[in-house]
Image (cartoon, rainbow, N blue to C red):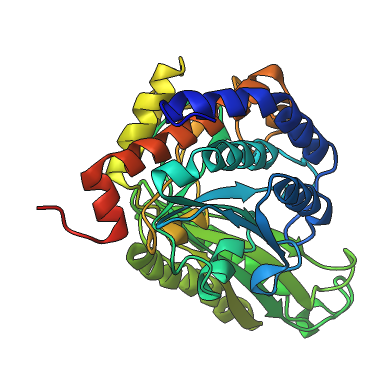
Amino acid sequence: MSMTDPRATVEQVIDSIHPSLIEMSRRIHARPEIAFEEVYASGLLGDRLESERFAVQRGVAGMATAVRGSAGPGPLHVVLVCEYDALPVVGHACGHNVICAAGLGAGIGLLAVAEGLGLRVTVLGTPAEEGGGGKIQLIEAGLFHDVHAALMVHPAPRDTLEPWILAAQTLEVAYTGREAHAAGAPEKGINAADAFVVAQVAIGLLRQHLPASTRVHGIVTHGGDAPNIIPASTTGRFMVRATDIDALAAVRERVIACFEAGALATGARLAVEPRVRYAHMVQDRDLLDAYGQNAVALGRSLVPTEESGLGPVSTDMGDVSLVVPSIHPMIGIDSLPSVNHQPGFTDAAASPAADRAIRDGALAMAWTVIDAASDQHIRARLLGRAVS
């Protein structure tokens, strides 16, 4: 293909494959797989990358469902991030099927112009964004060490450039008490369920003293076995979110103190196990501005974050953004009144609006990479070289 206009070339390629990208998105949507179990989705992605002349590695970073496809001479190395895990019960209520298809489309489009622009293009399938931290494992395994930029788009009710992305951590909480007959000998029991009641009341009271940006929420995963047995073993899973990793650490300790209060009040033993921590998101300004201009050129209507229909969220893409210049804009799929993690959003993620978002997201990301590769200042900054 002619390199006289790389933007036109990429648009032609993405438009030509758009029907197949929709098909992939719909197939992933129809077979939702939760974190680390995305065998079908990662297989589809890997097979398609091989058919498009990418050098493909499967099972990278010790994760069976992580896949990497790379092509192009470089030196500027860009990664298109693909997510494909679903949520329990509600399936693809975060639209990761759209993320996967858009990232793949951008990668294939850019491969057509990679040689002329000096690009190395990697499409990276990242498992377990929904709580498993797949991208963190990829970082730790060195999959981002030679990368100069990472891009993805995420479905949302409406388009917005800078979603509110908080640092987050999950806490696994367990109380151990002592069984007793709830009517005949309650004085002989230590009620591990009551410990959760005390802790949740304490967390509720704590919230009035936390910044508005902070979030604490969770579920009791096991609360007892029978109403006439004092519960001796209860478990829960709670999440703490804050503006950045430093603020998160401070709030986490205050929340743990609430769980300690439950143990103290009831006499139950407490065990708290912190799970994977997600960092806050740092968006690259140059890349984000270029994406915004390209999205508008495609007819997308960008709205301020507070008008997007979606409040604070968290993602392991935040961890990527701390090591590689990155962007994570939201692309609208006209889902309102439904928002992410609601069944109505699951339906919207396989709608004509979602199909359009695949094309527009792929093209806006690809054009953004072309803009960065063609601008000597942005390119040099990403490559780590100064321009006089």
At a point 35% along the width and 52% down the height, the residue shown is: 282
Image coordinates of residue 209 in percent, x first then y, are: 34, 55
Residue 22 appears in the rendering: yes
Given residues 200 and 88, the one toward you in this image is 88
The picture places residue 292, in percent across and down from the top left corner, at 37, 29
Q: Nearer the viewer, residue 152 or 386?
A: 386
Question: Seen in the image, is 155 located left or right of residue 343?
Answer: left
Quarter occupied by residue 182? bottom right
Q: Position of residue 330 (x, y in %)?
A: 49, 34
Which residue is found at the position 74% from the left and 35% from the top? 25
User: Is 276 left or right of 18, judged from the image as shown?
Assistant: left
Q: Is residue 3 toward the left or the right of residue 170 in the image?
A: left
Q: How many numbered badges does the structure rendering display?
A: 0
Residue at 29% across, 49% down: 379
Residue drawn at the location 78% of the way across and 30% of the way down: 23
* Pick the front one: 144 or 271: 144
Viewer-nearest residue: 35 or 142: 142
Considering every residue shown, the one lying at the far top of the view is 299
Q: Quadrant of the N terminus?
A: top right
